[in-house]
């Protein structure tokens, strides 16, 4: 599909426009006697998300509390932290940290540049996120919301990715046919498959080159994904 046919790029939020507060996780680990730099946490998260994706069962909710706990456990495992006591302490800390926003409060370094490039190129931009009702406020606080036409939060519309209905809601809001939109996200089974089922193009974010070969285009960052789509890639 050629670039001129694309009229909108829809984005995931977590691990696409924003990411976990790696510094906060490193500090929590330090309080438990575990030395890990924020960069170590980040690289462990890149690997953990691939394992998390493989763990989803059909119809499972990514917003269920067990998903966040499983994600943290995989991240700790990738860091080599396998103490049950430490894992329990981190899980308890995460449950009460910075509510209701939690850990997802840090913008990706090139998120604003990516959104601005898409807008300068004449494309509509929006977010489709499995979230708890806070994502629009978080994006606004970080200054990213001003680059978006709208935000679709799963808790507000009652349906989650990979269900194609959430993508259809966005298409209806944008008044576009599926072939005129693309989606950028970080989980293959949730984002890429969901978008494709709805008829959209999809690009998978893979900053650490941690994903095994997949039948989709990949990019190291959200800015790279936008550039790829503007060049005509992303099938």
Image: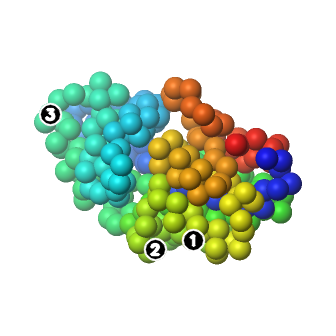
Q: Residue at x 33, y 45 (%)?
A: 57
Position of residue 46 relative to residue 109, above or below, is above
Q: Nearer the viewer's eye, disc 3 or disc 2?
A: 2
> What's the distance in space between the residues labelled 3 and 2, CA to CA?
37 Å
Q: Residue at x 78, y 61 (%)?
A: 7
The residue at the far left in this view is: 85
The image shows residue 8 at horizontal and vertical percentages of: 73, 61
Residue bearing mark 3 = 84
Q: Residue at x 67, y 49 (%)?
A: 201
Residue bearing mark 1 = 169
Q: Of callouts 1 and 3, which one flags the residue occurring earlier in the amino acid sequence?
A: 3
Q: Nearer the viewer's eye, disc 1 or disc 3?
A: 1
Label 2 neighbourhood size at 10 Å, few (<14), some (14-19), many (20+)? few
Q: Of callouts 3 and 2, which one flags the residue occurring earlier in the amino acid sequence?
A: 3
Label 3–label 2 contact, CB within 8 A? no
Q: Which quadrant would the C terminus be assigned to in this image?
A: top right
Q: Which mark is residue 110?
A: none
User: Label 3's element?
Assistant: helix
User: Label 2's element?
Assistant: helix
Of the pair 11 and 168, the residue shown nearer to us: 168
> What's the distance in space between the residues labelled 1 and 2, CA to CA?
8 Å
Q: How many marks?
A: 3
Label 1–label 2 contact, CB within 8 A? yes
Left or right: 212, with 8 as reference point: left
Q: Of callouts 1 and 2, which one flags the residue occurring earlier in the amino acid sequence?
A: 2
Label 3 neighbourhood size at 10 Å, few (<14), some (14-19), many (20+)? few
The image shows residue 131 at horizontal and vertical percentages of: 42, 63
User: Label 1's element?
Assistant: helix
Residue bearing mark 2 = 157
Asked if residue 82 can be seen in this view, the reply is: yes
The image shows residue 58 at horizontal and vertical percentages of: 36, 49
Of the pair 144 and 7, the residue shown nearer to us: 7
């Amino acid at each position: 599909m050629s670039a001129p046919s694309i009229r909108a790029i829809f984005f995931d939020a977590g691990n696409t426009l924003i990411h976990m507060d790696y510094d906060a996780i490193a500090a929590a680990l330090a309080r438990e006697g575990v030395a890990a730099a924020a960069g170590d946490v980040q690289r462990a998260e890149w690997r953990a998300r691939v394992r998390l994706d493989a763990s989803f069962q059909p119809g499972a909710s990514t917003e269920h509390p067990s998903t966040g706990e499983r994600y943290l456990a995989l991240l700790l495992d990738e860091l080599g932290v396998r103490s049950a006591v430490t894992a329990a302490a981190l899980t308890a800390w995460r449950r009460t940290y910075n509510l209701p926003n939690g850990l997802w409060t840090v913008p990706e370094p090139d998120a604003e540049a990516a959104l601005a490039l898409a807008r300068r190129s004449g494309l509509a931009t929006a977010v489709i996120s499995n979230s708890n009702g806070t994502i629009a406020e978080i994006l606004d606080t970080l200054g990213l919301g001003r680059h978006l036409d709208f935000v679709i939060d799963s808790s507000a519309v009652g349906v989650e990715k990979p269900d194609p209905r959430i993508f259809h809601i966005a298409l209806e809001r944008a008044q576009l046919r599926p072939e005129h939109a693309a989606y950028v996200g970080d989980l293959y089974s949730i984002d890429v498959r969901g978008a494709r089922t709805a008829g959209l193009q999809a690009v998978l974010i893979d900053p650490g080159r941690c994903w095994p070969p997949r039948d989709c285009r990949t990019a190291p960052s959200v800015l790279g994904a936008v550039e790829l789509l503007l060049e005509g890639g992303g099938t």
